[in-house]
Image (spheres, rainbow, N blue to C red):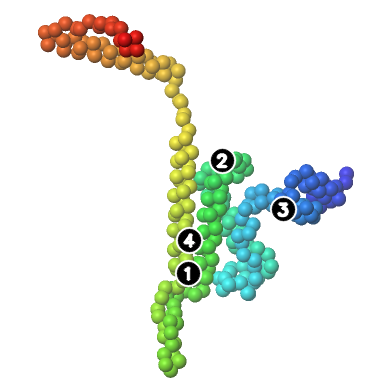
Amino acid sequence: MGKTGPKTEAGLATVSANSRELDHSAWTKNPEAVEAIETAKRLRNTKHGMYAAVPIICKADGCPYAQSCPLLEMAQAPYGEKCPIEIAAIEDLFGRYAEHFDINLDNKKAGDTVDLMMVKDLVDADIGILRCDSKMAWDADYIIHNTVGVTDNGDPITKQELHPLTDYREKLVNRKHKTFQLLNSTRKDKVGSKITVSADPSVRAAEMLKVHEDMARIEQEEKEAELAYYKKMNSSIPDVIDVEPIDFEKE
């Protein structure tokens, strides 16, 4: 049996044939670029495809978070690859959020698209918070001395301020809270847009009969009230007189 797979000659030929059937003319007419587009689409359609650009590239000792990286300390930092710490966080958070919001990742539906995009926003915010925490783990001090000017002698004039990361982290947390609210509201809208009839047919028939009886009772009460009114006024119920309308045009 011959080799199979997308990288074999047969596989590449199949990919090329399938690519030619799709219309990518709005982007490019280069066959190699068309194949690259198809590859990118397949990658995006994988379970974590939409998060492919989120993790930073590992720079080992040159990473801005190197001082708090446990993998670098264990000599396992894969230089030039996507950050394993962030990949692990993305997979964990994505799975937890999907489970919490009841999104079936193995059978995603078109109706899950908005939820998935909002979950991505949550994960993006969480990764941003993780980076802030990693940076602050090394800097530690929340108060910085920011230079706001210099004296005539050239000495710096400093002002104590909160570390910029604290403000950025707070914005990320607020962004998470807003996304949570949006997710909850969209799910309430979905539930509210569904009408579920769970009553037994016999119960439904009894309810309809009761409505009919209530209407008949109300009509009877109105007639009795009308009779009582005319009796109280010592007058009989006026007869209805048929009146022929006057045709002014004939006159």
The residues tagged by marks 4 and 1 sit, at their Cα atoms, a distance apart of 10 Å
Q: In what quadrant of the picture does the C terminus appear?
A: top left
Left or right placement of residue 48 versus residue 141 in this view: right
Earlier residue among tags 1 and 3: 3
Give the residue at mark 1: 165
9 to 250, vertically: above or below: below
The residues tagged by marks 4 and 3 sit, at their Cα atoms, a distance apart of 35 Å
For badge 3, the amino acid type reads Trp
Q: Of residues 69 and 200, which is closer to you in this image?
A: 200
Left or right placement of residue 191 versus residue 49 in this view: left
Earlier residue among tags 4 and 2: 2
Which residue is farthest right? 1
Q: Of residues 153 and 194, which is closer to you in this image?
A: 153
Which disc is residue 87 wearing? none
115 to 207, vertically: above or below: below
The residues tagged by marks 1 and 2 sit, at their Cα atoms, a distance apart of 36 Å
Give the residue at mark 4: 172
Circle 2 SS class = helix
Give the residue at mark 2: 111
Q: Residue at x 63, y 74 (%)?
A: 62
The residues tagged by marks 3 and 2 sit, at their Cα atoms, a distance apart of 28 Å
Earlier residue among tags 1 and 2: 2
Q: Position of residue 67 (x, y in %)?
A: 56, 73
Earlier residue among tags 4 and 3: 3
Circle 4 SS class = helix
Count residues near mark 3 (Cα–Cα under 10 Å), then give few for <14, some for 14-19, many for 20+: few
Give the residue at mark 3: 27
